[in-house]
Amino acid sequence: MEGNDARAELSALIQMCSSLSFSNRGMTILVTVENAAVARVIYRMVKERYNSEIELFVKKKMNLKKNRIYGLRILSAAPVILMDLGIYSARGLLEKPLQKIVASDNNARAYLVGAFLAGGSINPPEKTNYHLEITAANEEHAFFIQEVMNRFYLNAKVIERRNKFVVYIKAAEKIADFLRIIEAEQALFSFENIRIERDLANNIQRLNNIDVANEMKAQSAATKQLEDIRKIEQMGKYETLDQKLKDVIEIRKEYPEASLNELCNYLAEKTKKSVSKSGIRHRFVKIHDIAADGEEDA
């Protein structure tokens, strides 16, 4: 990794995972993370760039989960390190990094890698809504991360949740783009695979729902048509109908659950004449009008 890219990634990791303490040895950077791999990344990068004296420790959280906390105490050159990372000046700690840290697009990508490692997560896409978020160090930092993300057209937004500021992305395509930007290829492959399976299942379910709705609509229409036919027969008007209407009535009575498309085929077989779906529908409209007129006359 190019020097300024490594600096950008480490800037995000240190700002989001660290606190400062002071002792007779001077300023100390205390880094704490719950992921051993992230701790190793920070240790390696600090050693390679600054050759600082580092003290390692591991402790357990005092709760039911008993998660381990991996810690690093950076004991030497803390002000130099923080100033190089763009998060410290003569005025003290900065709320967000200096713009030089993300001067190039490659720097910005590296910064997003560090930010995601430090405070990022993606909802399991199998069951929940698509959602990627990064918990920022503070409000200014949240808007800084949002600005860096939106440099790549990710449409990131910021929300305050339980006194913390979170940068988030909702759209599945944008989450996939983010994973491409930070070159998380394995995570991207897994995310896209699940997304394709989920979207396919949703589309199948949607088509099934449409089929069910269409079937219910067709059955409702058939029931009304049979009711109109019953009224016409009870009023003794069947014999007064022209042959086209009689043919449709006989086909509907023979196939009470058939769709209009199916009735077209059955009628063509019986009469040896083709008829369109709209043609059959028009005949049923006439049958309904005759049944309704008969009711008014009665």
Image (cartoon, helix red, strand yellow):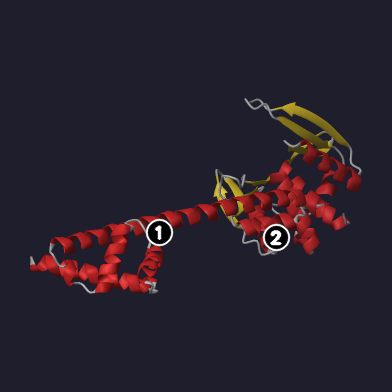
Q: Residue drawn at (23%, 69%), measured in percent from left and top?
A: 287
Q: Secondary structure at mark 2?
A: helix
**Label 2, label 1: how far apart the Cα atoms are:** 48 Å
Q: Residue furthest left?
A: 298
Residue 278 vs residue 133: left or right? left
At horizontal 78% and vertical 41% (from top left) the residue drawn is: 38
User: Mark 2 or mark 1, which is nearer to you?
Assistant: 1
Q: Residues within 10 Å of mark 1 (few under 14, many from 20)?
A: few
Q: Rate crowding at label 2 as few (under 14), some (14 to 19) or many (20 or more) other CA atoms within 10 Å.
A: many
- Which amino acid type is shown beneath numbered disc 1? Asn
Find disc 2 in the rendering and name its residue.
148
Q: Earlier in the sequence, mark 2 or mark 1?
A: 2
Image location of residue 268, percent across then percent down: 39, 70
Residue at image location 80% in from the left, 36% down from the top? 72
Q: Can the viewer see residue 62? A: yes
Where residue 232 appears, x then y in whole percent?
17, 64
The one of 141 and 228 positioned closer to us in this rendering: 228
- Asked if the residue at tag 1 contacts the one at tag 2, i.e. Cβ–Cβ closer than 8 Å, the answer is no
Q: Helix or strand or loop: what does disc 1 sit on?
A: helix
Q: Is residue 99 left or right of residue 296?
A: right
Give the labeled residue for mark 1.
Answer: 214
The relative height of residue 48 versus residue 178 in the rendered view (above or below) is above
For the point 35% across and 71% down, the residue is: 271
Horizontal and vertical percent for residue 34? 72, 35
Quadrant of the image containing the C terminus: bottom left
Tell me where residue 1 appears, x and y as whole percent: 87, 54
Q: Can see residue 93? A: no
